[in-house]
Image (tube, rainbow, N blue to C red):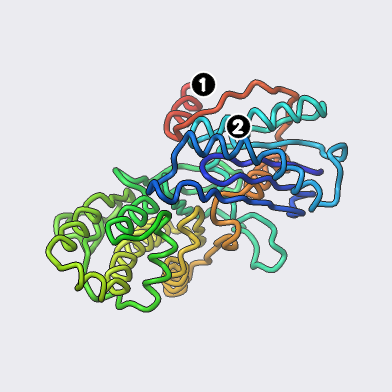
Amino acid sequence: MNILAIETSCDETSAAVTMDGRVLSNVVSSQRCHTGFGGVVPELASREHERLIVAITEAAVTEANITKKELDIIAATAGPGLIGAVMVGLCFAQGLAYALDIPFIAVNHIEAHIFSPFIDEGDTAGPPEERFVSLTVSGGHTLLAVVEPDLSYEIIGRTLDDAAGEAFDKTGKMLGLDYPAGPEIDRLAMSGDPFFHEFPRALTSHSRTSRNYRGNADFSFSGLKTSVLTYLQKHSASFIESHLPDIAASVQRAIVGVLVEKTIEAAVSRGIRSVSVAGGVSANSALRETMKTACGEKGLSLHIPGTRFSTDNAAMIATLADLRLSRGMKPERRYDTAPYASFEAEAAKKAKLK
């Protein structure tokens, strides 16, 4: 079973080919045109996807050493994401599937992140073999879910305001770092003191105002942003410059601390023995190491995709399509899937249809 997958939900144009679940190619082009704007500009992202989509797809098929006539199914992100960006990849994929007269599978981008630890990398301990708690952290989403072996899942926690990736980027902007600031904070923090300053961690045991935090799996990072801004306003530019690694490390420790505590608490309180971390922020070195240590202390198995599969990529789209097919999904020759921007809106729509 050869699957071609397309991913264009934000600012990565990606195409991948899998054969029976094994990744044959995964081509990703990350857009650099947004750096001067401090964030992704939707119109620029859509135009860049349109410019690159054909070449990226051709490269993925070539690298997989197959021809388009050997493809069995095409899958693509239908949402959530920037609606114009999603539309480019979705329409291209459906058009290609129609032209080749093969089935098309629409994939939810966030669900693909949740199941990205199932990507066969050839040198890992393998995917979760039982029920597990999934932490999905990216620039737009921070979710905790309990995932069942049949691929069904229940969202047990989500951000009440900003996502973790957004918190990294916005605090990084305050520190004068270029977008995306998350990787730069990670780099700076390696030479900084994470205990230099204690920034707040809302809805956790470290919060002064949340006495009944246990059992609350939701996240909140807006207070952290305000605290960082207030801290920077109280200190001189020279002080900030000389202690930039320390401040970055302190901010990172606050964000990572919340993510790890919430995830471990969710697993232990439910008697679940496996944990996964996925999404762009899962590439953060401190999050990986801290989660690894915490899971080891509690006797939990940890499953994280390789860093090249942490950020947006088409291999995770193909992997989820393959997982569904292996569990009895019957693909259709339908090419009228509409894009959607909101994960919550699409979930509510599905619940209503049931």
How much space separates mark 1 and mark 2, taking CA atoms? 27 Å
- Seen in the picture, residue 143 relative to 99 is either above or below; the reply is below
Q: Amino acid at mark 2?
A: Val
Image label count? 2
Nearest the viewer among 332 and 280 is 280
In the rendered view, does 279 fall on the left or right side of 93? Answer: left
Quadrant placement of the N terminus: top right
- Seen in the picture, residue 51 relative to 171 is either above or below; the reply is above
Nearest the viewer among 274 and 248 is 248
- Seen in the picture, residue 346 relative to 285 is either above or below; the reply is above
Where is residue 235 drawn, in percent x and y?
14, 67
Where is residue 79 drawn, in percent x and y?
53, 34
Which marked residue is nearer to the observer: mark 1 or mark 2? 2
Q: Which mark is residue 353?
A: 1
In the rendered view, does 31 fall on the left or right side of 211? Answer: right
Where is mark 2, residue-wise? 88
Q: Is residue 269 visible?
A: no
Where disc 1 sits, the SS reads helix
- Crowd tier of the residue under label 1, counting other residues whose Cα lies within 10 Å: few below 14, some 14–19, many 20 or above: few
- Crowd tier of the residue under label 2, counting other residues whose Cα lies within 10 Å: few below 14, some 14–19, many 20 or above: many
In the rendered view, does 26 fall on the left or right side of 299? Answer: right
In the rendered view, does 124 fall on the left or right side of 114? Answer: right
Q: Residue at x 15, y 68 (%)?
A: 236
Q: Residue at x 29, y 43 (%)?
A: 161
- Indicate the quadrant where residue 124 lies: bottom right
Q: Amino acid at mark 1?
A: Leu
Q: Residue at x 49, y 67 (%)?
A: 300
Where is residue 238 drawn, in percent x and y?
20, 72
Where disc 2 sits, the SS reads helix
- Indicate the quadrant where residue 206 lies: bottom left
Nearest the viewer among 117 and 306 is 306
